[in-house]
Image (cartoon, rainbow, N blue to C red):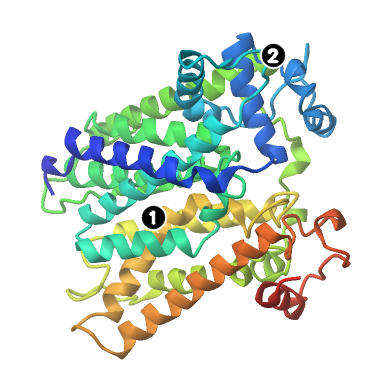
Amino acid sequence: MSAVDAPGWRRVGIWTAAALLGALLLHPLQLRAPFVDGQYYLASLHSLYVDGDVDLTNESERFPWLTWYSTTVEPAPGGLRNPFPIGPALLWAPFYVAYDALSRLVGGEGISSATGPVHLPAYFGSSFWALIGLFVLADALRMLGASHTERWSVTAVVALASPLPAYVTFAPDMAHACAFACVSILLWTSVWCWRNAAAGDPRWMICGFALGVTFAVRWQDALLGVVPLALMAFPGDRAAAPLSATKRMQGLLYFGLGGLLGALPQLAYWKALYASWVAMPMGAGFMSLSNAEPLRFFFSTWNGLFLVHPALLIILAGFALPWRTSADSPWAGIEPLRWAALLAIALELFSCMLVEDWWAGGAFGQRRVVSLLPLLALGLLALQRLAWAGGAGPRGFLLAGSLVLLIGWNGLSLVRLYDGSIPYNPAHRMWYRDHPVYGHYEWDRRFSDILLGK
């Protein structure tokens, strides 16, 4: 690959225009009451924009949950503070400013302390960034040799068969749509640098910056940095002369500097909040081996990953096929990327199991794995190539038919979430319609609720 793989301004402009239009079209699906975690992201944005500070005391007058939740996390001195990342607020900020300006331009009241936090720009921002993530993911697959049909079909499947649609429509004030976009950009920059930059090249700073921003949006996604680090260790051009240890160290320094710059807003925010550049506001017990429930994490009625989104199990199979490298392998030429992505996926899933609410609290499925969708797309690409090798045949049609059915199941499940037939938070009785809380393996009841509704 050469430098022509860099997206030109024309392509970026088309992506931006399409994402803006798509966000407008999706807007009618987003007119919902805000959810609890999202209150922190939105309140922190409003506080920075209107008050010019990081104290959420004013915002808690409109969002009482901010005060309640602050009693369960590490307290901060001198005011009500934000234990959640600042990244989503910063990614929504351009739309918040634009909404304020346009509202005042047409004679509205804009955004002020009197209006309180305004949800619509955040909802719009989540749609915009999710769509940007889809475009960037498809382009990353293009750089890996995917055809037009392959890259767009893979991108569509990982989006529609996953929790992502819920975090564009049902709960767009959470961080997951922004996280998906950031990881897509991280994957793109990783592949681009792997194909175009030697390990000691300053261009790895761009990749590091993408990782830093990803961290600022969702801290746990810093684990995905193993992907660019692994690619740096195994250059894409194997014919090139081996790099010296000095050159490799230079590459790591460039990468680290970029990461520091990208993460700086979060580090500065922590410094303002807790008088420390690094903090764990959720408390030491938030992540612990004692929280891990592997079987339930994957198969429980409480948002079990493969129970709620079975297509993801099929997609993961792509990383295992075939194990031996050969010229006709779907992984031929990109083996280091397979192992790097698989390691990142394993680390991220393990970290999700360690969280106090391993079922992801209020969620549509395992919402935290939305960050893994760009990497999972690689497995689906390999699986799709293997199924359609040699042209149309039973394997390809079986795979396509299975995925279409599972996308339909995912869509029906989301409809049932909207109408209240299945709970948003399976741990709390208040989310159920006159029925007791699900048992961990009450599959028949959940499937009945999805198929028949209430």
**Secondary element at tag 1:** helix
Locate residue 128: give its quadrant.
top left
Q: Is residue 10 visible?
A: yes
Query: Dot 1 corresponds to which residue?
Result: 340
In this orientation, does residue 310 appear?
no
* SS label for mark 2: loop
- On screen, 367 above or below 286? below
Is residue 32 shown left or right of residue 18? Answer: right
Q: Position of residue 119 (x, y in %)?
A: 60, 31
Residue at 78% of width from left, 14% of height from top?
A: 79
Dot 2 or dot 1: first in sequence order is: 2
Rendered residue at 29%/60% (across/down): 152
Q: Which amino acid type is shown beneath numbered disc 2? A: Ala
| The one of 82 and 284 positioned closer to us in this rendering | 82
Q: Quadrant of residue 319?
A: bottom left
Q: Position of residue 341 (x, y in %)?
A: 40, 56
